[in-house]
């Protein structure tokens, strides 16, 4: 086939001369309009005849799919790199949270806003102390809450370690909450958020 590129003939000639079979994938530009083939070439008949048999399988669809997947992956990596750059350099605080609304990653600006190194996952919020939720004699205050995986287990463990379960675990909307105190009397809340309960 004179329309084939020279490298095809070089491969087949090597099989004819050495007797070593060859398996490869190659693109046939001239003879097949750029289609890809999985090729297995091997010598047949007597060695001195230098006859070569060739098995072809058109793998163009697979190669195109592989190329498209690689291109999509490259675009995704480029987009992620851009997102990372924006995330790290943004002048405002940004964070990624998981399904349970726990911080998984915060940018430098948010870490700076929320405290020194080691406290990047600490957040704060303000809640109005309405009369239907707080007695009138309770002054404004900070309430410390720890996100936990199992509120009941944490409450039990707190008691074992010398703490006090001031309010046993109870359900409050999408959260299961317990109010605890440590042996020195500091009060805090353990809370498990269940987004499926929303």
Image: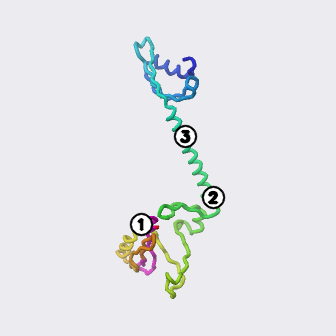
Relative to 135, say whether 124 is above or below.
above
* Residue named by callout 2: 89
Residue 165 lies in quadrant: bottom left
Q: Nearer the viewer, residue 112 or 84?
A: 84
50, 29: nearer the viewer: 29
Q: Residues within 10 Å of mark 3 (few under 14, many from 20)?
A: few
Q: CA distance from mark 2 to mark 3?
A: 32 Å
Task: Please tell me whether residue 42 is drawn above or below residue 98 in the rendered image.
Answer: above
- First reached walking from the N terminus: tag 2 or tag 3: 3
182 displayed left or right of 91:
left
Mark 3 vs mark 1, CA separation in Å: 41 Å
In the rendered image, residue 194 lying in the magenta stretch gets the answer yes
Q: Secondary structure at mark 2?
A: helix
For discs 3 and 1, the disc positioned in front in the rendered view: 3
The residue wearing badge 3 is 68
Mark 1 element type: loop
């Amino acid at each position: 086939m004179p329309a084939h590129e020279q490298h095809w003939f070089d491969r087949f000639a090597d099989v004819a001369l050495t007797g070593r079979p060859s398996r490869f994938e190659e693109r046939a530009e001239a003879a097949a309009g750029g289609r890809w083939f999985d090729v297995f070439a091997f010598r047949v008949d007597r060695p001195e005849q230098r006859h070569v048999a060739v098995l072809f399988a058109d793998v163009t669809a697979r190669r195109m799919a592989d190329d498209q997947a690689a291109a999509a992956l490259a675009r995704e990596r480029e987009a992620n790199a851009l997102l990372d750059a924006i995330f790290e350099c943004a002048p405002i605080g940004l964070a990624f949270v998981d399904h349970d609304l726990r911080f998984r990653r915060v940018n430098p600006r948010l870490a700076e806003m929320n405290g020194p190194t080691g406290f990047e996952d600490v957040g704060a919020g303000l809640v109005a102390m309405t009369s239907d939720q707080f007695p009138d004699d309770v002054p404004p205050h900070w309430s410390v809450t720890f996100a936990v995986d199992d509120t009941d287990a944490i409450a039990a463990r707190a008691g074992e370690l010398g703490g006090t379960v001031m309010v046993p675990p109870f359900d409050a909307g999408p959260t299961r909450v317990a109010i605890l105190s440590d042996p020195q009397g500091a009060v805090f809340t353990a809370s498990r958020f269940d987004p499926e309960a929303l």
